[in-house]
Each structure stands twice: as C-alpha cells, then as structure tokens.
Image (tube, helix red, strand yellow):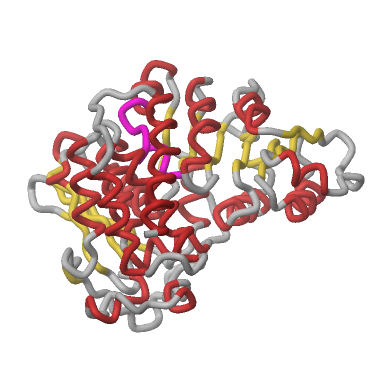
C-alpha cells in the first residue's frame, strides 16, 4: 500500500471505457492521474478531455484527423504527438505506471504489446489483444515482468473470485452473458434482425461494434478465448450462462463445490477502478447494489444452436495458433459490413466460419504473421460480402 499517485496512460480515452476511466480518475481524490490520453479520430472530444485532465501527452493516431483539429486550447505543458508509432513510444515512458488499454479491436494490439514489452502494469479492456496473440502476449509479459489485469467485467469478476482459493483448486469458471436483445429469438427471427434492433442492448451502454458482438454472442466467444490464455485454462473449464440481469458478472467453481461470484450493477467503472488501484480497494463512483428492493437473479444455459458463435469461440480457443487472429479480423469486418447494410445479421457468424476454414493454419505464428493474417481475413470477408 502506498500514497504515491498512480500515473496512467488511457489508450482510447474517447470510447465508452475510456470515458468511464476518466470519471474514475476524476473521483479518485488525487490517487490516480491521467498523464497520457489517446484517440484515433475523435479529436474534438480528445481536445476537450485534455483541457479537463491536463495530461502530459495527447496522442492522435490518425494524422489527417489531427491536422484538421484546432489544438490552440491545449493546456500549457500538454504535448500533442501524432501517429501509431508515437503511441507505442509514449506507453513505454518511465513516468507511466499503468496503461489502460481500451482501443477497440486489433488496432489496440501494437500499443498494448509495446506497453507489455516495457514491463508496465496493463489494465486490459482490449480483449482482442489476447484473442489475436494470447500465447505470445502472455509469454512476453512473463519475460518482461509486466502484469495484465482484466477490465472486461467478466474477466475482472473471475480474477476477483479467484482470490478466494488457490489457483490449482479452480475446477471451472462460468462467464455470464446478458444474451443481448435476441436471447429469445428463433433462428428465423435472427435472420431478419435490423441494425437498429441489434444496437438496442438491454443492459449495457457500449459502442456499436461491441453491441453487435453482444447481439451475436461473438463477444462471449472472444471472451472464452481471452479467458483461455489469461487464466491458463483448458477450454472444458470455461462455461457460459445466460444471466439477463447482468449483475453476476462471472463465477468461479472450486474443486470442493464452492462457487464464488462477483456481483454489482452493470457499471464498467467498478472493474476499471479495481484494475487501476489493485490490490487496494477504495470508495468509488460505480453504481451500488440496492439491497432494500427485491432482486431477481436468473440463469439459463446458453443455446449454442441459436448462437453458433459460442462453439466457434471454443474451437478457436482449442486450436490456438493463427485462428484467433483470423476470427477476430473476420468478425470486425463482418460487423462493419452489417452496420453498413452490406451483410445480413444472420450472416456475420457464417462469414467468420467460412474465412476461418479457408485460412492456412499455423500453430506457432509470429506477431508479424498474425498481423498479416489480420489483413487477409478482412479482405476475405469483403469478398464474401460481395457475393
């Protein structure tokens, strides 16, 4: 325990997780400080955040977007740096204690990799880093002395619940899922889902890509893969249950039959604060449970036929190698196609499976191999969409 201020780089500060992170930092009473903020193209909001937070650095990875923005109101002492390479250099700076990695998609891999290589504490909200390159990332973290703490509510819940026993006594974990807006839809109904319907998540306020992933349950498929590498589990030790209330964020079952769960209202500020201040717990701004009212918690098995993404996630978690990179890229491209009206909702997962089945599998790829396959998979989905 220490009274020292924790200096944080918030990667993806203009996204939903990034904005929640800044709210946690603002409410910390000075325990936490944002020293670097980054965005890709939402420069107006980034400039506003810089005025409010007065960081040492603001980073824009899209050079054209940076050139269009008026930066004249940046606080004295705040430096603007531009480009993805600049972001990789910033996260390695000695004054940064924790890197909150919240850049959505595989775009966040390089900067997170650079932070791990620098031996930083990583508060990981970018699940794609472990989906794409889980074995490589965990090996690098072990060699460089970096620590990865999960920010995803499900993996944070597992991490917290695991503190109740020895790691070798964990029998399995149970990831909970809201089921999205279509948990009771038939296969025929799913085939005709509109963009507006898919974006209407019942409990969480997230960006469009993550919201669509929740509707297809691809988010849970990716979380199975992430948990496989983050917690070094066998795939058969990972279960998924539908929990519409989104209050039990995940559970850990120990070999003696005890099940430990982490409960809280669906508010990302709690797992964010836990990762930023670990192992300390402090008063925070996350919503609290109201124990004065009736609370109903229900669970049901996830229907793999209705949501075929789940089995696809299990297959990828078992195979490893290049499969995670291909699945993640194909899904990002397919979701983008759906949001543009170029691909039916019911075709997102089949498109991903098709691309995965046609790639050249490599069980031991390099990081460059994975990045190359990321581009290949996106191109394949583009061709699939056009047919």
Give the image location of residue 170, x and y in percent: 16, 42
Horizontal relation, residue 306 to residue 71: left or right: left
Does 144 appear above or below 235?
above
Viewport quadrant of the C terminus: bottom left
Q: Residue at x 50, y 49 (%)?
A: 272
Q: Outermost residue toward the right?
A: 72
Q: Residue furthest front?
A: 387
In front here: 16 or 153?
A: 16
Q: Quadrant of residue 142?
A: top left
**Is residue 281 placed above or below 340 in the rendered structure?**
above
Q: Residue at x 34, y 54 (%)?
A: 154
Main SS of the magenta segment? helix
Judge whether residue 16 is colored magenta.
no
What's drawn in magenta, residue-wise?
126-136
Between 256 and 87, the residue placed more toward the observer is 87
Q: Which residue is at a point 62% across and 55% down the rendered structure image?
A: 19
How far across and how far down the image is residue 316, in percent? Answer: 23, 43
Q: Is residue 261 visible?
A: no
Work out whether 111 lies above or below 69.
Answer: above
Identified at 22% across, 44% down, the residue is 357
Q: Is residue 51 left or right of residue 59?
A: right
Q: Position of residue 228 (x, y in %)?
A: 25, 40
Q: Is residue 187 left or right of residue 340?
A: left
**Magenta stretch holds residue 134:** yes
Q: Residue furthest left?
A: 256
Residue 337 seen in the current view = yes
Query: Which quadrant holds residue 311?
Result: bottom left
> Where is residue 23 drawn, in percent x and y?
64, 55
Q: Is residue 383 above or below residue 197?
A: above
Q: How many marks?
A: 0
Q: Quadrant of residue 127?
A: top left
Front-most of residues 293 and 70? 70
């Amino acid at each position: 325990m220490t009274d020292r201020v924790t200096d944080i780089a918030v990667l993806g500060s203009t996204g939903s997780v990034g904005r929640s992170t800044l709210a946690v930092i603002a409410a910390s009473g000075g325990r936490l400080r944002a020293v670097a903020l980054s965005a890709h193209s939402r420069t107006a909001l980034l400039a506003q955040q810089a005025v409010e937070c007065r960081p040492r650095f603001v980073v824009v990875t899209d050079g054209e977007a940076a050139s269009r923005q008026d930066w004249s109101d940046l606080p004295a002492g705040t430096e603007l740096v531009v480009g993805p390479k600049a972001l990789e250099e910033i996260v390695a700076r000695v004054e940064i204690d924790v890197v909150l990695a919240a850049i959505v998609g595989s775009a966040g891999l390089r900067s997170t990799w650079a932070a791990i290589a620098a031996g930083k504490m990583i508060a990981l909200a970018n699940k794609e880093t472990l989906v794409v390159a889980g074995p490589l990332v965990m090996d690098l973290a072990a060699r460089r002395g970096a620590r990865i703490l999960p920010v995803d509510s499900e993996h944070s819940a597992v991490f917290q619940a695991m503190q109740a026993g020895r790691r070798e006594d964990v029998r399995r974990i149970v990831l909970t899922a809201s089921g999205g807006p279509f948990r009771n839809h038939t296969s025929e109904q799913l085939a005709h889902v509109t963009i507006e319907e898919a974006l209407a998540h019942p409990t969480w306020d997230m960006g469009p890509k993550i919201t669509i992933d929740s509707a297809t349950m691809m988010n849970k498929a990716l979380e199975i893969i992430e948990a496989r590498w983050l917690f070094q589990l066998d795939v058969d030790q990972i279960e998924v249950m539908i929990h519409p209330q989104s209050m039990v964020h995940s559970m850990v079952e120990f070999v003696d039959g005890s099940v430990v769960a982490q409960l809280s209202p669906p508010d990302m500020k709690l797992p964010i604060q836990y990762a930023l201040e670990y192992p300390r717990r402090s008063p925070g701004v996350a919503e609290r449970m109201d124990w004065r009212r009736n609370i109903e918690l229900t669970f049901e098995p996830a229907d793999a036929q209705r949501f075929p993404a789940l089995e696809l996630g299990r297959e990828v978690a078992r195979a490893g190698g290049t499969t995670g990179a291909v699945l993640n890229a194909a899904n990002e491209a397919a979701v983008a196609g759906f949001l543009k009206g170029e691909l039916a909702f019911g075709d997102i997962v089949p498109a991903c499976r098709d691309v995965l089945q046609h790639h050249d599998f490599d069980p031991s790829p390099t990081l460059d191999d994975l990045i190359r396959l990321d581009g290949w998979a996106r191109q394949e989905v583009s061709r699939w969409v056009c047919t």
